[in-house]
Image: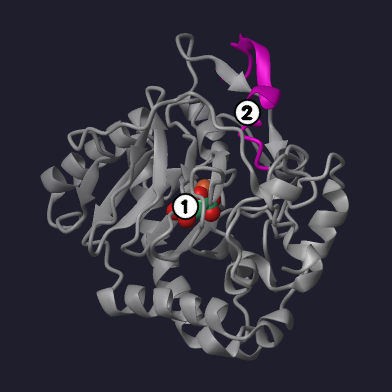
Amino acid sequence: MSKCTDEEDPTTRKPEYDRLSKLKAFDETRAGVKGLVDSGIKHVPRMFHHQFENNPVSCGIQVSIPIIDLEKVKQNRTTREEIVGKVRNASKTWGFFQVLNHGIPMNVMEEMKDGARRFFEQDVESKSRFFSRDFTKRVVYNSNFDLYSAPAAKWRDTVVCSMAPDPPKPEELPAVFSDIMLEYSKQVMNLGYLLFELLSEALGLNPDYLKDIDCAKGLVMLSHYYPICPQPELTLGSSKHADNGFLTILLQDNVGGLQVLHQNQWINVPPTPGALVINIGDLLQLISNDRFTSVDHRVVTNSVSPRVSVASFFTTALVPDTRLYGPIKELLSQNNPRKYKETTVKDFITYFNSKGLSGTSPLPHFKLSKPSHGDK
Ligand SMILES: O=C(O)CCC(=O)C(=O)O
Ligand SMILES: [Fe+2]
């Protein structure tokens, strides 16, 4: 076994552990976690070992995030209001829901997952062209965006691409999935517009409100590959975190592994044919003054099947933007005073990144020490 894998044979474990050089050696392979698995690794290297907290995993099949059927969203006022009510409840109590009949054709979703899988399953040389840690680049492939700052590395590889407001030219994207990335992201933008309308209405605002303040302006797409893991009990595909943007639309394959923290229990989000998973991000919680909730989630690994997911983040994190976001004034009242300071998306993300995916919410940092009745 080569040194870069950091694989530890328990019988020859050495007392000293130079974590940084292990991380560097791993990073320099540019082959990601998939490269470790392809090399035949039998033990999860120490840099991937996670501290597990005590929250139990719910074994009940009766608890699950809500599933909302959008089919009748444009049929008439009553059906629309019913759907808006479900979106409001789910966004408050769960921060997560799945949507069906959302308008993105099944074949586009399937091709997007196949395309992402093709990218990761090609040879290392082809992927290396996109290997970088500089997120100002249009396409960035690496393993663990916070490899050097997080307490433990995650068992996954990712390719990140900024798709809006300035869509890439096909030749800027990896050829193995450029066409489907463009098609899928166009469809995701349309679904995003609809979801932001429903969320605006759920807050009692006019349907265009959230779009008009640029919540749907930026789209960053993360395609994740979670290789098979020889010791799933030691590591995580994604550690506990909440998403920092406005909204996330997640496409997952049929393997499963995503869990949402609800009432201190990890609840599985079962793959549901044709469905997309939607979750509220931290910035939407902030501007809704806590009417919506950004909820912690994680991904567990397994030893049976690699998993692919595509997370589309509505965020202007990668766009120069000086707009200030604070609790929406129309939502504030004597009984509902403002809870947060204003921030730019850039400052919010910079603070978030300084913590890595450590599971610590950035929201308390932007909270006013005393809710304010001023400027409601
Ligand atoms: O792969 C998943 O199911 C979740 C990914 C995720 O949480 C993220 O990209 O923020
Ligand atoms: Fe996430």
Evaluate whether residue 206 shows in this view. no
Which label sits in the foreground, 2 or 1?
Answer: 1
Identify the mark at residue 363; answer none if there is no mark: 2
288 magenta-colored = no
Question: What range of the chain is rendered magenta?
Answer: 357-376
Image quadrant containing the N terminus = bottom right
Q: Residue at x 26, y 74 (%)?
A: 106
| Residue, disc 1 | 301
Q: Secondary structure at mark 1?
A: loop
Closer-to-camera residue (58/48): 48
Image point (13%, 57%), residue name: 75
| The residue at label 1 has a CB less than 8 Å from ligand 1 | no
Residue 192 in the image, given as x and y percentages of width and height: 42, 58
Residue 375 magenta = yes
In 3D space, how far apart are the residues under numbered discs 2 and 1 (Cα atoms)? 28 Å
User: Is residue 149 toward the left or the right of residue 278 in the image?
Assistant: right
Check the image and tell me how it is coloured: one colour
Tell which of 141 and 275 is nearer to you: 141
Question: Badge 1: few (under 14), some or many (20 or more) residues near its Cα, within 10 Å?
Answer: many
Is 78 left or right of 181, judged from the image as shown? Answer: left
Residue 5 coordinates in the image, percent (x, y): 72, 62
| Amino acid type shown at disc 2 | Leu
Residue 155 image offset from top left, x and y in percent: 58, 55
Using the rendered view, name the quadrant where residue 160 is placed.
bottom right
Dot 2 falls on a residue whose secondary structure is helix
